[in-house]
Amino acid sequence: MKTVLLIDEDQQVRESLALWFRQAGLAVIEAADGETGLALALAGKPDLILCDQLAPRCNGFQLCRFLRAQPGMQPRIVLTSSGNYGVDRQGAVEAGADEQIIKPIFQHDVARLLEAFPGGGAFFTTVATRPRKSADAAAPSGGGVIPPGPAIVRFWGVRGSLPTPGPTTMHYGGNTACVEVRADGQLIILDAGTGLRGLGLSLAAEYPDVPLSMTLLISHTHWDHIQGFPFFDPAYNPRNKLRILGYEGAQAGLLTVLSSQMESPYFPVGLREMPSHIAVEELKDARFHIGPVEVKSIFLNHPGVCVGYRINSTCGSIAYLPDHEPYQRYKYHTAHPEFAGTTEFLAYGQRMDQRMADFVRDADVLILDAQYDLGEYQARVGWGHGCVDDAVALATQGNVKRLFLFHHDPSHDDEKITRMVEWGRSFVATLKESLKVDAAREGLEVVLQPAEEGAKPQS
């Protein structure tokens, strides 16, 4: 009997697929995460594997590369994806997948896959997934010299795609993504765009004689989110410790990507030549701790492997979703003509958007991709970025207290960003909500007071 292995965190997706494969007479093995799926694949040697390319604990790209390197393992591997980005399709093939299928998956998609597996009996088997490790098991701890007190969020880089220095961007800033968070004694850095250089110089001046322990969370390895790392001054101080955490990309690991941009002829100093103590760790669990600070992650709708983070401290919560295109609007615009606007496509997109709202729910601060206005978005569907209208909608749906529009488009000057903020505020007023809307701005500092003081965010 032919066997299919289904690897997907979404139980609803697995249940639908399992039913269709069962009706076709295949045995079914299920896994809710990639690590479990990989173990089941090695043990059971299935004929067909359907794996979500962003499966937790071992994504589809990793699974493909590993299985293709195993002698005697030649299953047909199909990666499933919520997006329809060309770079992901190319990455899937390069990793060793036979093809990619876009969610939601229909019964005719399964029928096409089954053409390679004629016959089969009526026997159906479900292998239960083993429990995951404790969510805190993989938690890298932080530590440093940050004194107790309120949590502080500082913006060092707020621009997307490309740095844009000049007189028309002086108010909001032209550096790419970098946000500093100080909470519960931890120094946490969100992304390593060109803004990281300014943060590094500031830290070196603030702590000239004190060793620092820092944690850098990488959302993804597109250049505008890592290009500041070679210029991070504290990384050249042998007394400092730096943990770099993120998820493996579609085609290469986190360490490989960070090292590559510092290789000759691109840069004169290699990553391994940096004298500080640097540890690069690839995350598997969606929840972990940096010292006492709880951090959660969620995959975003953006080309490649991209995640958002939520930092929960004793003083409040900060959600950081730097590059994200809302699922429902994306599905509506990019569906194949015969399925565009259908109940299945819109219901799937709505369900995925609800996950995002649940992730940011009740956050004190939400830093969210709002690269375009609505008119611009219509011409850029599928680029992996959102618009102001959807940013406000997500923030209000999630009952967020304060929204910062982020990842400003390189073509937007200060005047344009100010107009976008005004539009967002008017939208909130129309909705009769209490959400406070601002644009992220270099140098802006947001303070979250300890909960017992009952104070609201200040800036």
Image (cartoon, rainbow, N blue to C red):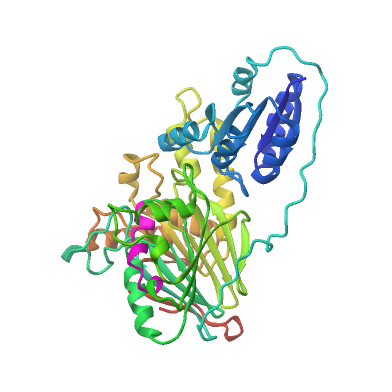
Q: How many marks?
A: 0
Q: Is residue 42 left or right of residue 239?
A: right
Choose between 358 and 279: the one closer to the eye.
279
Q: Residue 364: horizontal and vertical position, in percent?
A: 52, 70
Figure quadrant of the N terminus: top right
Q: Residue at x 74, y 28 (%)?
A: 19
Residue 224 counted in the magenta span: yes
Determine the residue positioned at 25% across, 58% down. Answer: 416
The residue stretch that appears in magenta: 223-235
Q: Main secondary structure of the magenta part?
A: helix
Image coordinates of residue 222 in percent, x first then y, are: 39, 51
Question: Residue 200 in the image: x percent, y percent?
Answer: 36, 73
Q: Is residue 96 above or below residue 258?
A: above
Q: Quadrant of the C terminus?
A: bottom left
Picture quadrant of residue 207? bottom left
- Identify whether 278 is placed above or below 130: below
